[in-house]
Amino acid sequence: MIFISLFIILAVVLIAPFSVKVIEEELEAFLFVIGCIAVTITSQWSAFLIKEALIEPIKIALAVFVAGFFFRALQKSIAHSVNKIADAIGVRLFAFLAIVLLGFLSSVITAIIAALVLVEIITHLTLERKNEILLVVLACFSIGLGAALTPIGEPLSTIAISKLKGIPYHADFLFLFRHLGLFVIPGIVLFGLLGALLMPGKRQKMHGFTGRKEETIKDISIRTVKVYFFVMALIFLGQGFKPIVRAYISGIPHQGLYWLNMLSAVLDNATLAAAEIDPSMTLLQIKSALLGLLIAGGMLIPGNIPNIICAGKLKIKSSEWARLGLPLGLLVMTGYFFMLMLLK
């Protein structure tokens, strides 16, 4: 009965955010409730779990809070400098630097702030809409990869470190950098090079995206609270799904986990990481699962936080994103699969 209940809960987690608008808008609260239910069903409540759920989200929430004020202070400077810099160094070099720098910085300033900086850049960069969408998609792939290098970069990396910090991995702050850096760093550079190759040589006289909203202290505070409870919810969810992970997922070969996680294209990759990653898995399984989540997460809008932020603020349609994200993601996933086979 426990396994049946958990599979029903998993189905609800996967389907409800797409079919119920209120749940989509209040995802943090929904996942928090579902996580508590999963832990209750499996009788896993403990003082240690509660303490972990209260403490683990602090680092990323604090990073989001501090970086939010940093971005707010620089918002006007970014707006005034974008076109001047693009004219001085050329659009192609500008695109390369924007994609690569945001990818690497996302592990420090968080994927959320990196996405907001990207929105600010795109809003003021004078390009045709199709080229602006191209830059957004490439940069979001880069941000999604780079943010995974540290546990403060995004909820996925926070959850992964939280779940692997004990025996046998004793994951520390640089655990993901050590084990994924060889894959992530070339990927960030690759997306930057694609931007340099595919963007036009000069700015156009028109641009596809206009309008922006200045960050307020209220915006920063609400975002920080949401991130805190989102990570807390994922910790409960991950703990609740442990029986399924150990009975089924930990037995899937690393190749299967890699391609299975193409689900990340339509489901938030942090939620999937909470349901999958477990210390009972081998290091190769963990690397394969995380890489599958990270790459596929850029293919469609729901896959990760940067996609959702940029598409929402810039009014990018799902079809516009998919036209670029799906073929690009499939090509990159194929390349990374062979890389995994060679470097395992």
Image: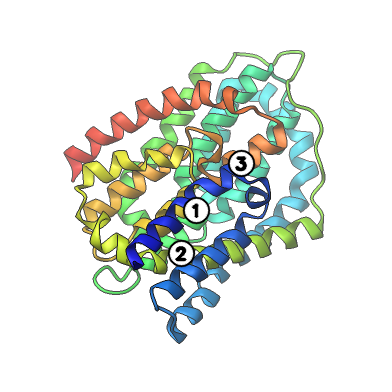
Eye-nearest disc, 3 or 2: 2
The spot of residue 283 in percent (x, y) is 23, 57
> Would residue 174 be visible to someone looking at this image?
no
N-terminal label among 3 and 1 = 1
Quarter of the image containing the N terminus? bottom left
**Residue carrying label 2:** 237
The tag on residue 13 is 1
Per the image, label 1 sits on a secondary structure element best described as helix
- CB of mark 2 within 8 Å of CB of mark 1? yes
Three-letter code, disc 2 = Leu
Marks 3 and 1 sit apart, C-alpha to C-alpha, by 18 Å
Residue at x 51% of width, y 57% of height: 155
Is 336 drawn above or below residue 327 in the view shown?
below
Three-letter code, disc 1 = Val
Residue at x 74% of width, y 58% of height: 220
The spot of residue 114 in percent (x, y) is 61, 46
Three-letter code, disc 3 = Ile
Determine the residue located farthest toward the front in the rendered image. 1
The spot of residue 308 in percent (x, y) is 61, 41
Per the image, label 3 sits on a secondary structure element best described as helix
Q: Quadrant of residue 90?
A: top right
- CB of mark 3 within 8 Å of CB of mark 2? no
Per the image, label 2 sits on a secondary structure element best described as helix
> Would residue 11 be visible to someone looking at this image?
yes
* Residue neighbourhood size for the residue with mark 2, other residues' Cα within 10 Å, grouped as few (<14), some (14–19), many (≥20): many
Residue at x 40% of width, y 69% of height: 239
Residue at x 33% of width, y 63% of height: 3
Is 213 drawn above or below residue 2 in the view shown?
above
Residue 181 placement, left or right of 225: left
Q: Quadrant of residue 277?
A: bottom left
**Residue carrying label 3:** 308
